[in-house]
Structures are given as structure tokens and as C-alpha cells.
Amino acid sequence: AIGQFGIGAITIAQFGVGIVFGFGQIILGTTAIAQIAVALLFGMGQLATGYIAIGQIVFGYYGLCQTGLAAHLWSQKFRDPEAVRFFKQLAEYTGFLLNKK
């Protein structure tokens, strides 16, 4: 679905629900990239939730952020070794290498 308001398996919208993936300003879905990304598995945005959450403010199990709440958090104030290992491994797996050594 594409539009200002969208609901679909894959959604690109200002406000939307993406069952598999959503991209936009405010998105709810399994995976989401948005300013406000409310996701179950992977969320990326200014405010993000999900099992893996990346953004300025996050809520999740693994969090990479400026500030947030997560079981394993990598932020400006906290550097959980498990979160560091996970996000470095994720970066290597996806091709976004943080440090080439």
C-alpha cells in the first residue's frame, strides 16, 4: 500500500500499518523504518520499538540509541557488552562494517 494512510503487507505511507514492512512517518508493523516506528521485530527511527530497535529513543530487547530502555543497550551512557557484540555482528552480517581489523 502506498499513500497518506496505508494498510498492507508492505506499506509506504505517512501513517500506516505494514504487516511485513512499513516505511513512513508513523508506522506500525513487524518491521518498520519511520520517524515513529512501532515494530515487533525491527524498528528504526527517531522513536523506535522492537526486538531490535535503532534510533534516538528506543524500547526493545537490543537497543542502539542516544537514550532508551532495553535489556541490552548501547547508548551514550550505557555500553552493554552483549549489545556491542550483537550490533557489531549485525553490521558485519549486513555489510555495514564498523571497524575493519
Image (cartoon, helix red, strand yellow):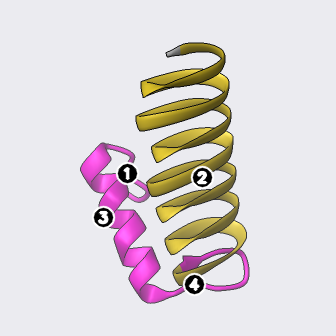
Residue 96, x across and y down, in percent = 39, 46
Q: Nearer the viewer, mark 4 or mark 1?
A: 4
Q: Say what amino acid the circle numbered 2 marks.
A: Val
Res. 35 image quadrant: top right
- The residue drawn where x is 37% and y is 51% is 97
Give percent across and percent down for residue 25. Answer: 71, 33
Within 10 Å of the Cα at label 3, are there few (<14), some (14-19), or many (20+) other Cα atoms? Answer: some
The quarter of the picture where the C terminus appears is bottom left
Residue on which the image places disc 2 = 38
Q: Give coordinates of residue 13: x percent, y percent.
A: 63, 22
Which residue does the numbered mark 3 point to in the structure image? 89
Q: Note whether 76 is above or below 38 in the view shown.
A: below
C-alpha separation, residue under disc 2 versus residue under disc 4: 24 Å
CA–CA distance in space, label 1 to label 2: 26 Å
The residue sitting at 52% across, 42% down in the picture is 32
Q: Can residue 100 be spotted in the picture? A: no
- Gap between marks 1 and 3, in whole Å? 9 Å
Mark 2 Cα shell of 10 Å, populated few (<14), some (14-19), many (≥20): many
Q: Earlier in the sequence, mark 2 or mark 4?
A: 2
Identify whether 64 is placed above or below 61: above
Residue segment shown in magenta: 73-101
Amino acid at circle 3: Gln
Between circles 3 and 2, the one closer to the viewer is 2
Nearer to the camera, 17 or 98: 17
Badge 4 density bin: few <14, some 14–19, many ≥20, Cα 10 Å: few
Q: Are marks 1 and 3 in contact (CB under 8 Å)?
A: no
**Alpha carbon of mark 4 to alpha carbon of mark 3: how far?**
15 Å
Q: Earlier in the sequence, mark 4 or mark 1?
A: 4
Residue 87 visible: yes
Helix, strand or loop status at disc 1: loop
Nearest to viewer (mark 1 / mark 2): 2
| Amino acid residing under circle 1 | Leu
